Image (tube, grey):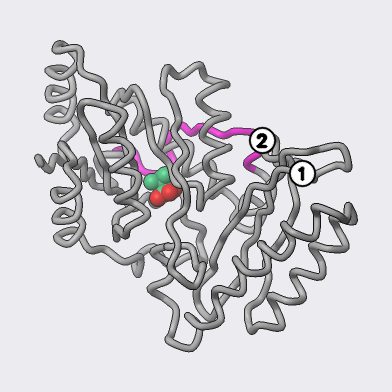
Amino acid sequence: MQTIEQISILRSEIKLWRQQGLKIAFVPTMGNLHQGHIALVEKAMLLADKVVASIFVNPMQFGINEDIDNYPRTMAADQEKLVAAGCDILFTPTPAIIYPKGLENQSYVEVPNVSHSYCGESRPGHFRGVTTVVCKLFNLVQPDIACFGLKDYQQVQVIQTMVDDLSMPIEIVPVATVREPSGLALSSRNNYLSIEEKKIAPALSQNIQWLAKEIQHNNDFIGLAKKAAGYIDNAGMKTDYIHICHARTLQPASEDDKELVILAAAHCGKARLIDNLQVQLT
Ligand code: PAF
């Protein structure tokens, strides 16, 4: 695996692959890789001839009260995992390479509607930062496909909307969430959990599953979501939101909708955890 920091070197490698007609898959990450990220690389390997991963802790997607400096950085371990998974190129630009004029002078990409609720409401500007950096990385890597984890369900919908709206010739491949045996979704944020909090945190996925069963025979979506929030709080977490939504538009689900997703976020100690579950009503 080649680790490349400079855009010019990345572009010339990609050009060589393109000249050979190879199919390129891309896995953008912020590093601190776990099995969830490796599942993305494995999927990318199955679907393409060459795989590029990136590690870039993107300052534009962090809020002013979010501690980017303490975001876990584990480059050497990440590189080992990517080599073992078979990744071909790891792109590791610095903030000065991605945002040479500074964040204030950077053009941005913003997706309306689907960006502005749920995590978009709790973290203003977050999805603008995500779409701006992903657009920029897409332009640098020029992949045929890009793999994203469904743990960040709203992010996948935001990126799919950007790709559709801006006619980007890239197939977005959503990849299933990898979980611990307790049901807790793998996330870099789980590193912030104490031993005690780690025992509490599975309450998020457990109550999403409870809700998924209830909505099969009860369409009081708002009342049931409120109940689930209460259960999550009683387990020792603090619910940020839990909503039953249309799976693609993410609008609050109506009685007639059949393809749904339950989106939830909750604070557990210092960690803000998110999780979701797609539900098909019969
Ligand atoms: O999901 C992430 O790790 C990030 O939001 C992404 C897509 C790499 C953009 O910085």
Closer to the camera in the image, 123 or 209: 209
**Element at badge 1?**
loop
Where residue 253 appears, as percent x and y from the top left, is: 80, 44
Q: Can you see residue 171?
A: yes
| Quarter placement of the C terminus | top right
Marks 2, 1: nearer the viewer: 1
Relative to 48, 224 lies left or right: right
Region rendered in magenta = 100-115
Where residue 11 appears, as percent x and y from the top left, is: 18, 24
Q: Which residue does the image show at 30% across and 48% down from the upper left?
A: 56
Give the residue type at disc 1: Leu
Give the residue type at disc 2: Arg
**Element at badge 2?**
loop
Mark linked to residue 248: 2
Q: Which residue does the image show at 29% across and 50% down from the upper left?
A: 38
Q: Which residue is mark 1?
A: 281
Where residue 186 appears, as percent x and y from the top left, is: 42, 63
Query: Few, some or many C-alpha atoms within 10 Å of disc 2 (few <14, some 14-19, many ≥20)?
Result: some
Asked if residue 113 lies in the magenta stretch, the reply is yes
